[in-house]
Amino acid sequence: MKEYQQLINGKYVNSQSGEWIEVENPFTGKIVSRVPKGDNRDAETALQAAKGAQDAWVARTASDRASYLKKMAEVIRKNRIELAQILVAEQAKVLPLAQVEVDFTADYFDYYAGWARIYEGEIINSDRPNENIFLFRKPIGVVVGICPWNFPFFVMARKVAPSLLTGCTIVLKPSSLTPNTTLAFAKMIDGIGLPDGVVNFVTGGGKTMGKYLVESPLTDMVTLTGSVEAGQEIITSSAKNVTKVSLELGGKAPAIVFEDADLDIAVKSIVASRVIFSGQVCNCAERVYVHKNVLDKFLEKFTAAMQEVTYGDPLAKHTPDMSSQIDKNQLDKIDAMVVKAKEEGAQVLTGGKKADTPSGYFYEPTVLAGCTQDMEIVRKEVFGPVIPVLTFSEYDEAIALANDCEYGLTSSIFTKNINTALKAVKDLKFGETYVNRENFEAMQGFHAGWRKSGIGGADGKHGLMEYLQTHVAYIQF
Ligand code: NAD
């Protein structure tokens, strides 16, 4: 069994508690590693290190800081196969998708390195003669990054890259379910010359160590990717020191299929958006609204396509579309929601139950017809390959149903009419809308949820701004 260590102040350390967290491979059920079960003392040491390193880090030029991001990208590319295998083993992501995540993560470090010579301040006209108003953009300081289990490697980069580029230092805590890729990477960057304390990787519980990190007066910003519940707890914990939060939380993305849609494109895109990583993605298509005149045809094609979705060993030579859910807890949650939907009148067109497999926590790709807006399966996030289908008659009805949701992360529409597309983009109240394609964001975009899906966001220019604060100087001459 592999053993990983935390990276705190440039040193690879076990927890001061001496305790460990065991990490299970969800497909095989075997324990693949153990990582330190960090406690408040580890969190404090890491925060002190990040605080201590910040002044010297920000004193460097942005292009100098960017050179470390480029080295991180190089390290990832050099170890791309090993990292993808570690990712597969800790979370049962199918190997090609794990490889995409690893390669995308390397590109992400390079992408933000490119911002070193791009982000800038402003000079503002003064009302006084002989005065300049300079607006500087300065790093927020010590960032606490808290990651989920679904894209543990990429989300690590989503927090580390903009932190370092802007001159922030960071303490990052991966999910206890998937800490291996982050800690393996921590070891791989030994030797790139990063000053001690600039990046610290700690492992421990969310409600214990995570809470301590958020509540600390040393923390200047918290960036969480995770559930709405964790976001709510972090808002409460961060109130103590009025600490800035950036929250990327859950979603319940609607997909609207208008009467004139190309049904083959719609079916292909919605299936892809639903089953990617076994349905465990925040921006997955999660509920479909189909125009009544094409409902039967859509259901026929969509059900057939979901029946063709394959699942199995994430390392199989003929890669399945999906593998195991992350753990038994998640599998039981999905099943309970489907059982409830059936009791409420949903009709199972395919799937509808746990899959009978020799190992792993598999759920059958599931299509539920006859669903209504008030059902839990239509209103709450389902982290699994399950999709409820509803119908509509008029454009306004479809938009109203899609917008009637506590989450506001992503959405998608399918139509051949440019006017319908542009109107829907205007009327939908979500952070992202995909037109005639699957849900998957770009690093140069801006991934930000409305309503309970979050505060602030990540990626691109606007994601970088999250890590900067303004300082305005009025200079009379
Ligand atoms: P989670 O909320 O259970 O855990 C996320 C992280 O928060 C973990 O590291 C956990 O230890 C920590 N945490 C939990 N409670 C905390 C607290 N009180 N204080 C500090 N830290 C705490 O989420 P998860 O199950 O790991 O991930 C799945 C969720 O993440 C889904 O809801 C999904 O939609 C969401 N997600 C959102 C995005 C996005 O970009 N919007 C991306 C990926 C995942």
Image (cartoon, rainbow, N blue to C red):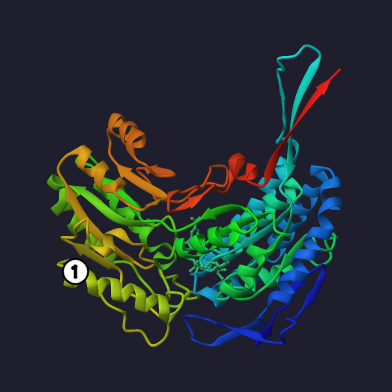
Q: Name the residue under label 1.
A: 348
Q: Is residue 262 visible?
A: no
Residue 150 horizontal side relative to residue 433, left or right: right
Q: Which residue does the image show at 29% across and 71% down from the upper left?
A: 337
Query: Residue 141 or 312: which is nearer the viewer?
Result: 141
Residue 55 horizontal side relative to residue 356, left or right: right
Query: Residue 203 or 265: which is nearer the viewer?
Result: 203
Q: Can residue 328 be seen in this view?
A: yes
The quadrant in which the N terminus is found is bottom right
Task: Say few, some or many: other residues with alpha carbon within 10 Å of mark 1 (under 14 / 14 to 19 / 20 or more).
Answer: some
Q: Which residue lies furthest to the front in this view?
A: 240
In the displayed structure, 336 sits above or below 22; it is above
How many numbered circles are shown? 1
Residue 286 horizontal side relative to residue 127, left or right: left
Q: Which residue does the image show at 29% across and 66% down from the upper left?
A: 308
The percent coordinates of residue 203 (x first, y second) are: 66, 74
The percent coordinates of residue 276 (x first, y second) are: 42, 62
**What amino acid type should be assigned to the residue bearing mark 1?**
Val
The percent coordinates of residue 282 (x first, y second) are: 44, 58
Q: Residue furthest top?
A: 129
The percent coordinates of residue 434 (x first, y second) are: 39, 44
- Residue at mark 1: C-beta within 8 A of ligand 1: no
Query: Residue 79 or 230: which is nearer the viewer?
Result: 230
Q: Which residue does the image show at 53% across and 46% down from the upper left?
A: 442
The quadrant in which the C terminus is found is top right
Q: Quarter-wise, where is residue 198 in the image?
A: bottom right
Disc 1 is placed on an element classified as strand
